[in-house]
């Protein structure tokens, strides 16, 4: 049976294949992204966990940093998990590093746990009535967010799942759980952006024929 939507997954570090499996469960087609041309035809992009400085270096070397900023500017959806949240942030500290600046948030690289520490939590979110399963592995901390950022879930008074328009970020790893809730939300965001692009293309086509 054919897939309904294509979602790019940065395939450099982290368990990007787990994101791919989650997307396939939701009838979306994962596309491994390693260069700007891989963004063609995708409605959204997932930036998975990993080591954020290494990932950022790769993005810059391949020209994916500017390509992702342009992609988001055109309405493309981007979802960062764990280190992906660091890459999206407006400001990164402890220690400071450059980022894509797509999410109006200040993020600290201080982890909730040690490098090999892992914590599973079940916390309240605005996405469903039941608690949302969250797996934290060296999680960054969202210290503050701007007024345009919606906090969807928090832990210890700090946001752990946020949305700003077509940008979604989680400090935990939803791809490592059996719960598809967060990825379903991202597909809704991505579908909305894809629909807007289709409508804009149709409008332009009508103007050119007029």
Image (spheres, rainbow, N blue to C red):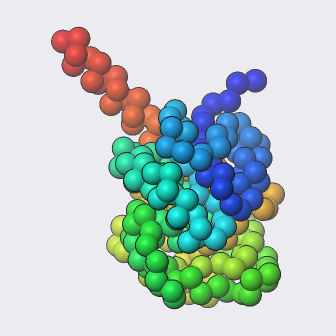
> Quick one: 62 or 72, which is closer to the camera?
62
Residue sitting at x 47%, y 59%:
60
Q: Position of residue 57 (x, y in %)?
A: 52, 64
Q: Quadrant of the N terminus?
A: top right
| Relative vertical location of residue 79 with respect to residue 25 in this rendering, above or below | below
In which quadrant of the rendered image does the C terminus lie? top left
Image point (72%, 71%), residue name: 134
Residue 130 % position (x, y): 72, 66
Q: Is residue 133 above or below residue 157?
A: above
Residue 145 seen in the current view: no
* Extreme residue toward the top, this view: 209
Q: Position of residue 89 (x, y in %)?
A: 45, 70
Q: In the image, 108: left or right of 200?
A: right
At 64% from the left edge and 85% from the top edge, which residue is drawn? 111
* Residue 103 located left or right of residue 58: left
Residue 66 visible in this rendered orientation of the protein: yes
Residue 150 falls in image quadrant: bottom left
Query: Horizontal and vertical percent for residue 131?
Result: 72, 70
* Front position in the image: 86 or 95: 95
């Amino acid at each position: 049976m054919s897939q309904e939507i294509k979602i790019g997954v940065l395939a450099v570090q982290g368990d990007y294949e787990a994101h791919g499996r989650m997307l396939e469960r939701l009838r979306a087609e994962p596309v491994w992204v390693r260069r700007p041309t891989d963004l063609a035809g995708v409605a959204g992009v997932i930036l998975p966990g990993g080591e954020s400085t290494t990932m950022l270096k790769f993005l810059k070397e391949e020209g994916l940093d500017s390509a992702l900023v342009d992609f988001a500017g055109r309405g493309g959806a981007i979802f960062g998990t764990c280190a992906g949240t660091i890459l999206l942030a407006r400001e990164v500290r402890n220690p400071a590093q450059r980022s894509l600046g797509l999410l109006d948030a200040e993020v600290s690289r201080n982890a909730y746990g040690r490098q090999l520490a892992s914590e599973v939590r079940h916390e309240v979110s605005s996405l469903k009535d039941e608690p949302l399963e969250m797996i934290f592995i060296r999680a960054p901390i969202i210290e503050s967010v701007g007024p345009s950022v919606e906090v969807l879930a928090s832990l210890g008074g700090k946001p752990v799942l946020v949305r700003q328009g077509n940008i979604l970020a989680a400090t935990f790893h939803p791809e490592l759980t059996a719960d598809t809730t967060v990825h379903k939300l991202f597909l809704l965001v991505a579908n909305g952006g894809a629909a807007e692009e289709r409508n804009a293309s149709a409008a332009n086509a009508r103007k050119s024929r007029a």
